[in-house]
Amino acid sequence: MSYLGELRQNMRPLAAASLGVGVSLPLFAYTNSIFAPHLIEAFGWSRSQFALGGLAMIAMLPTLPVIGRITDKVGVKKVALTGTLLVMPAFFAYSMMNGSFAMYLAVFTALLIVGSMTGTLVYTRVVAENFGRARGLALTIVNCAPAVIAFPVLPALNSMIVEIGWSKSYLVLGAFSTVSGLIAILMLPPDRAKIPRADIAVEGMLDGTRRGDYRIILKSWLFWLILVAFFLCLLQTQLHSSQMNLMLIDQGLTTQTAAWIASVYAAGTFVGRIACGLALDRFPTPIVTFISMFIPAFGFFFLATDLDTLWVIGISMFVVGLSVGAEADIIPFLVARYFQVRIYNTTLGLLMTCSFLASATGAIGVSISLELHDSFEPLLYAIAGSIVLGSVLFLLMPKSQSFEKIG
């Protein structure tokens, strides 16, 4: 089958996965930063205190492997439906906040768990099951969806918060995510886990209950190399999620200008995902991964300098977005490239704990930087250095296409 022919044949599962991911956890990462300055103003929280909200990511460390393992066993539909039905209660709880930071942390943690059941961890299995030659491009399309949706939504959301308040805006966002998520589930084809073995193109798909899978994964040097490299590269996560608008306001921007810059950042993720996805299908995986993850070091470096003009800030955030777009494609691609599909979600769940651990660590860094220096500048320099080191480690991954998959 041709490259584009594979895309045409699997348009339905691709569209379903794209919509499901587009209105779930990746989108919430964008919208969190829009709500941030309004919540701080409403409740009188300090910026360093709000940064500690990233510690909620620690709750995901035991959760993600469980979600991944369950998805390997019962399929995408059941897990995604459960998560989608729980989204609205989480946003309703957001709308009822009364200024308690502990309540905010509890709701934020709950939404992280619920969102993970409807995000890339679950839905990218649809791509791993149905795509081979065009897997990189398919992952790109799926992971572009949040950026495409965020581009018009972020400025509109900020305006809505100003007009009707943050409480009602949370309800509108929750309803939008729930309805769109249900539509995505209705579009999904039957789970491959329900089809007899003879009808499955992917070898070993149904052996998800085999004992020793975790031992196989954890004994792999390649798994640990990827884990450490991504940890170093993803310490930046808090800076482009809940802290992005605060970081941009620290550069001298207004909340509305910061929201527009957030849209520029979202456009960068769109471009980065397309370029990375196409490159992964054509060029050596280690080289593409290194280049994709190295690029944002430049953006964070210039944000740390005193070059606080609108153009410099805009270009820097666009460059940062290029890598964030690439990272969302690369982690699922590396799992499908180096690990058997029967343990796809189990492996992906373990690796995604790395991103949440890095995010929690980065949150501590943000809080310390704001507490000691009342500025993001020292942390921005440190993040730029960690990205350089982590991206270089990816060059050690196997380049040969004949590499025997783990598991």
Image (cartoon, grey):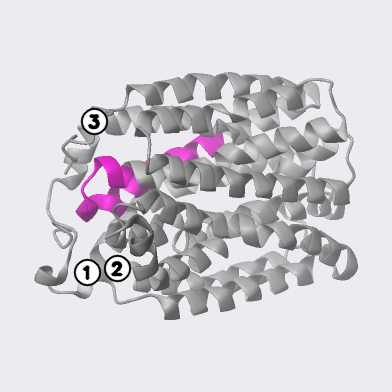
Mark 2 vs 3: CB contact within 8 A: no
Viewer-closest of 319 and 389: 319
Mark 1 vs 2: CB contact within 8 A: yes
> Which numbered disc, 3 or 1, marks the residue that appears first in the sequence?
1
Residue type marked 2 = Gly
Viewer-closest of 25 and 397: 397
Residue type marked 1 = Ala
Q: Is residue 377 magenta?
A: no
Residue 220, relative to residue 271: is it above or below?
Answer: above
Q: Is residue 343 magenta?
A: yes
The magenta stretch spans which residues? 335-361
Which numbered disc covers residue 400?
3
Q: In front of the other: label 2 or label 3?
A: 3
Q: Check disc 1 and report the residue beneath it.
A: 193
Task: Give the percent coordinates (x, y) of residue 28.
Answer: 62, 57
State the residue at coordinates (71%, 37%): 317
Q: Quadrant of the C terminus?
A: top left
Q: Main secondary structure of the magenta part?
A: helix
Task: Give the percent coordinates (x, y) of residue 320.
Answer: 64, 36
Q: Check disc 2 and report the residue beneath it.
A: 75
Residue type marked 3 = Ser
Q: Quadrant of the N terminus?
A: bottom left
User: Label 1 to label 2, Cα distance in Å?
Assistant: 6 Å
State the residue at coordinates (50%, 72%): 84
Could you tell me which secondary element the residue under label 2 belongs to?
A: loop
State the residue at coordinates (16%, 63%): 206
Quick one: which residue is furthest to the front in this view?
A: 2
> Which numbered disc, 2 or 3, marks the residue that appears first in the sequence?
2
